[in-house]
Amino acid sequence: MPQGTLNNQRGFVLTVTLFTVVALMLVTGASLLFANLNLRSTGALKNSVGTLQAADAGIQHALGIMPLGHVFSYATETTLLNSFSFETGYTYTVKVINDPASPGGDTRAILTSTASGPNGAKKVIVAYIKRGDFGLGATSLPGSLAENTETNFSGDTFSINGHDRCNAAPSVPAIAVTDPALATEIVNNTISDGGLSSDQMDNVIGPGGIHSVHSTPPPEKAVFQYVNDYLALDHTTLPGTTYGGNATWGTSSSPRITHVTGDVRISGTIQGYGVLVLDGALHVSGNFTFEGLVIMRGEGEIRATGNARIYGAVLIGESSSQDADAELDIRGTVNIQYDSCALGAAEGWVPLPKAPKIVAWQERFAN
């Protein structure tokens, strides 16, 4: 090839080389730019999802602290949780108000949870709630305090069972208290403060592992108010004495409210159904079976050398001071098992406390 032609080709090659280098630099720069955008998008998505989860955590937290009841009492907007810290970098605020569109204006409420996250992320969740399952344990001690040593358990033949006997509702705590310190005291394996011994732990079953003792929100009314409501209705009053024969205190087809005005001793056979209000202790040397709600507004003492079976729930009256007797004193062959079906009659007379339950949930775009 002539020398002049070769010289002309050298300029063309240089131009092509420069063009190729520039093109590669542009592609590389674009790739780095898009990679950075992807990292930013991933970070923003992570913050968005984390903040949404924080808002949902606020809804669940609020459900766990709302008082148990049968309606809602938030006529005006009420702040349940204010700037509550969640994990690192997240907070949520939860407000509640009755839903005026619900029957009566108080059978449904609206929870609004607003969460803030890193880099200004914000999410809002709105949840509609109503009353769901009963808010009772198999045995409930609302208002009892750990400092008063409220419980005593003797022997290894008793059982308190929070699993629903009629399989119609979720399990509940075997023992429900409103003081977290009392829940700890019952399960700390120290009997000097009224707690369960190690070989008694599996006698108290329900949700929560080897024992089922949980702290729950307080009911909307005190135990004595429930007693007054029941006793304001038609009921049968019996003296506190020894019952040696056979008797029926209500049946499933004809439940009744029975009020015993003192300590009761059962050496015969008694079956009952409905609501039983006891002013004193219950001692059973014969056979006693009751289905429904048992309210012990004096000392919650149940002793059995025979067979004492309660299917439904036991509600113990509050105590605000130290006294000589434990509020819940279980001894001998006592069997208490939660039964949501057996509580139906009691609920029909006086609405029982129920836990809030989500019926609808949606994300609202934050401003």
Image (tube, grey):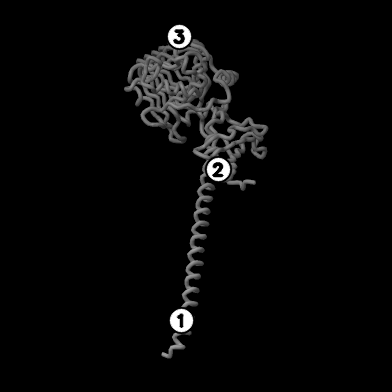
Task: Provide residue 132's location: percent of width, then percent of height.
Answer: 53, 35
Q: What amino acid does circle 1 point to?
A: Arg
Residue at mark 1: 10
Q: Which mark is residue 324?
A: 3
Q: Secondary structure at mark 2?
A: loop
Residue at mark 2: 117
Q: Which label's residue is closer to the chain start, 2 or 1?
A: 1
Task: Provide residue 111's location: percent of width, then percent of height.
Answer: 60, 38
Q: Residue furthest front?
A: 3
Residue 119 visible in the current orientation: yes
Q: What amino acid does circle 3 point to?
A: Ala
Q: Residues within 10 Å of mark 1 (few under 14, many from 20)?
A: few
Mark 3 and mark 1 in contact (Cβ < 8 Å)? no
Query: Is label 2 or label 3 in front?
Result: 2
Q: Residues within 10 Å of mark 2 (few under 14, many from 20)?
A: many
Query: Is label 2 or label 1 in front?
Result: 1
Q: Secondary structure at mark 1?
A: helix
